[in-house]
Amino acid sequence: MSKERIGFIGLGMMGLPMARNLIEGGYQVTVFDLDEESMGKAHESGASTSVSASETASKSDIVITMVPDSQHVEAAITGPAGIIEGVKKGSVVIDMSTIDPEIGKKMAGLLEGKGVNFIDAPVTGGVGGAEAGTLSILVGGNAEIFERTLPVLNVLGGDVSHMGPVGSGHTTKIANQLIGVATLAGMAEAFVLAKKSGLDMQTFFDAVKNGAGRSWALETLGPKILAGDFEPGFMVKHMQKDLRLANQLADDTGTSLPTSTLIAQLYRSIQAESPESTSQGHQALVQAIEKLSNDQARL
Ligand code: NAD
């Protein structure tokens, strides 16, 4: 059986390497992004470009969205020249962005009216995971559609988990973010404390990196902080969005989130610095702790 044709919408930090992996995996990929430069890069990698999400959808059996937030997913699917205008009956739309689960459910309902299936399949594992095709993928949706999309998702990820009905992938991802951000916050405090206490920072990092504090944040973001590298893999503004989504879910479910609420305020202080500061990598959280302690955790 020939491979399903893929449409890929949103070619940012994550989307571009993911689309490239699909091309390398032998899929025919048509792309769309509002940013011309990203489209050019995808084209150089072997993707066909299109002028709209609608055109992308019309040339695809499976359409993936990987855009920043709920409003961008809505624009790509139901906005002018959106997916819903071009998509064929029997196709599948997969949203891999991290967004409000309720918007995912709304999109599912609207697409269902056109005989199109929707699943949510957000990811975790960072840009490194996107490039290596080792993302953890958290899927919400009908089991049959999950099975149909599995060959495609297996190209993009290492672990692909079916979490339940539509919305449960997004919900899982939002909960996951609280683990990651609290780990980062603990690490940021530990680094500043070690620095202020006069420890050698490289020796400190090497000594603790394989102990009980071991984590993705420590391994991946720790060296960046020590080097003063705040280039984005995952931008501050996207982490702020995820903390907002978590807060909304907590409101709906009556859940207390004292730690992540405090971390959201620390990010707010980064945001207050300048409009550009939220385009830094989310490891910039350390800057808030550094400011409070009047020192920098650098080598
Ligand atoms: P990004 O800002 O780098 O890229 C988003 C892309 O979407 C941009 O190229 C933008 O031009 C495009 N876009 C926006 N609206 C569009 C529209 N209507 N039609 C077409 N293109 C549109 O973001 P990213 O870091 O790639 O993240 C994408 C999603 O993945 C977010 O929801 C984020 O939370 C999630 N995520 C990111 C990471 C990471 O490490 N960067 C990891 C896991 C999940």
Image (cartoon, helix red, strand yellow):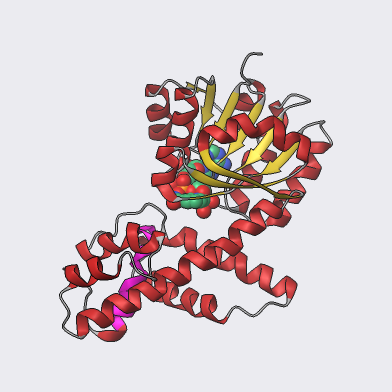
Q: Is residue 50 above or below residue 65?
A: above
Instruction: Where is residue 294? Give x, y as percent.
Output: 23, 84
How many numbered callouts? 0
Residue at the spot x=26%, y=60% of the render? 223
Instruction: Where is residue 286? Give x, y as percent.
Output: 33, 72
Residue 60 lies in the magenta stretch: no
The residue most toward the front is 211
Q: Main secondary structure of the magenta part?
A: helix
Location of the C terminus by quadrant is bottom left
The residue most toward the right is 113
Residue at the spot x=66%, y=51% of the render? 169
Quarter of the view holding residue 183: bottom left
Q: Which residues are magenta?
A: 279-291
Location of the N terminus by quadrant is top right
Q: Is residue 13 above or below residue 292?
A: above
Quarter of the view holding residue 222: bottom left
Q: Is residue 44 visible?
A: yes
Q: Is residue 131 above or below residue 299?
A: above
